[in-house]
Amino acid sequence: MNLKSTNKVETNKYELEIQVNGDEFEQAVQKAYLKQRKKINVPGFRVGKAPRKMIEKMYGEAVFYDEAVNAVYPSAISDAVAEAKLELVDSPSVEATEVSKENGVTFKATCITKPEVEVADYKGISIEKKVDEVTDEAINNEIEKLRQQGMRVTTVEDRAAQNDDEVVIDFEGFKDNVAFEGGKAENFNLTLGSGQFIPGFEDAVIGHNIGDEFDINVSFPEEYQVKELAGQPVVFKVKLNEIKQKELPEVNDDFVKDTTEFDTVEELNADLKKKLEEAAQKKADAEAEGSMMDKVIDGMTAEIPEVMFERRIDSMQSDFENRLAQQGLNIEMYLQYSGMDKDSFRKTFEEQAHRQVKLRLALEKIAQVENIEVSAEDVENEFAKIAEQYKMEVEKIKTYINEEDLKKDIAVEKAVELIKTSAVIK
C-alpha cells in the first residue's frame, strides 16, 4: 500500500489517494481465481480445473478484478488512514479510480474526521444547587402507595357506579351508525376517573347501575392518532356488567407491621423521610452536574460533522428497539401505539443526541488538555466493575469491550470529576 496524497477538501473532510501496487494486486487476483474456479465451466476441462489464463481468455482479463479489489481495499484504506493520522467518525466513501494488471489499484477515499475542539472556562463553574424539601405530603404519598398495594377490590350491587370504581363493561363504537375498527370490547375493566378513555366517556358511565344499557355520545380529540376518527363525533353503545369498589387499609401500627419491616407508623414515617431526603439529594446532585455540563458545552467551539449526530441517533434508536424487543414488542408496534411515523420517532432523539455528541467532544478535549492519564489499574478496576454488573467473568468481558475505547471512557469520567471538584456550588 502506498499513500500517494492526503488532501483536506473542506472542514473535517479529507481525500486520500491510495495505491495497491501490481504485485499485491496480482496476489489478490490469484486468490480470487482459486476461489472462483470451482464455479466456472470451461469446455474441455473438468469443473474447477480450468487454468486461469484460459478463463481470462474466455471471460476477459478483468473477470477476477471485482473480488480482488474488494479483498485488498479494507486493509489498504485502514493502513492509509493510520498513516495519515486521521481520526474518522464514519466509514470512508471509497472509489477505485484505476484498476490494471500493471499498476494495481488506485483508490480515492473520502474521509470525515473528528473536529478540532476548543473548550473554555470549564474550571470554577458557578452553579446553584437546590435540594427539594421533603414535605409531609410527599411522605403521605409514599404511604398511599403502600395502601394501594394492600388494596382490596369488592363487588358492589346496591348502588350506581361512582368515580374511582372499577367497572366491567361491554361497548361498541359507531360513527355515522357504522361500527369502526378497534371500538369494540367485552368484559372490559375500566377504572372511572383514570382518563384511560377519551374525554367524556368515563363521566357518562357514572350514575349507571349493573345491567344498564345506554349510549354515550362523545367526540374523539382533534389530535387522535387515527385520522379517520380525529375530532369526529361517535356513539358508544355500552352495557354495565359489574361494579367494583376499592377498599384501602387504615394506616395504623398493625398495617405497618403487616406491610413493612417496621413496628410503628412513626418508625415508617422516619424511614420514608430519610429515603426521600436521600433521593432529593441525588436528584439535586444530578441536576447540578447537568447544569455544569451544559456550561461546558456552552464554552466549546467546534464545527461538528452532521454524520456524528446521525450516528448517535442511530445508536440511540437501536438501543430503544432492543429494549422494546426485551418486552416482546417491535418498532412497528410501538409506532402504531404512539401514533408516530419513523421520521417523527427519529426526531425524538435529536436533542439528546446533539447534547451527548457535543459533551463527549468537550470532555475528550479537556482530558487531553489536562493530560489526564488512565493507568492499567484504572482499566482493570473498570473491567471488574462491568463484569460484576453483568455477572460475567472479567476475561469474558474483555472479549466484548475494546480496551482503548474503555480508556477513553475512563479519561472522560475523570474529566467530569475534575469539572465537579473545581466547581463553585452555591
Image (cartoon, grey):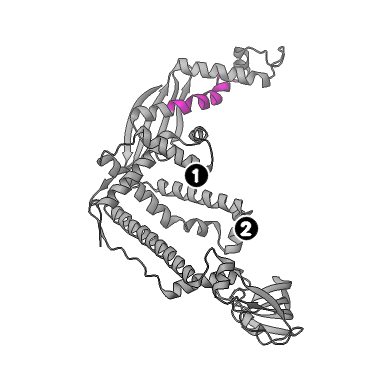
**Residue type, mark 2 in image:** Met
Q: Which residue is mark 1?
A: 389
- Distance CA(mark 1)–CA(mark 2): 31 Å
| Secondary structure of residue under mark 2 | helix
Q: Which residue is mark 2?
A: 333
Let me know if residue 73 is in the magenta part: yes
Give 288 or 338, whichever is nearer the viewer.
288
Give 306 or 372, whichever is nearer the viewer.
372
Q: Position of residue 140 (x, y in %)?
A: 48, 74
Let me know if residue 382 is in the magenta part: no
Asked whether, in this view, residue 60 is left or right of residue 5, the answer is: right
**Number of numbered discs present?**
2
Q: Nearer the viewer, mark 1 or mark 2?
A: 1
Asked whether, in this view, residue 12 is left or right of residue 423, the answer is: right
- By secondary structure, the bulk of the magenta-drawn segment is best described as helix
Residue 309 vs 24, above or below: the answer is below
Give 126 or 363, whichever is nearer the viewer.
126
Of mark 1 and mark 2, the one earlier in the sequence is: 2
Identify the magenta region.
60-76
**Residue type, mark 1 in image:** Gln
| Secondary structure of residue under mark 1 | helix
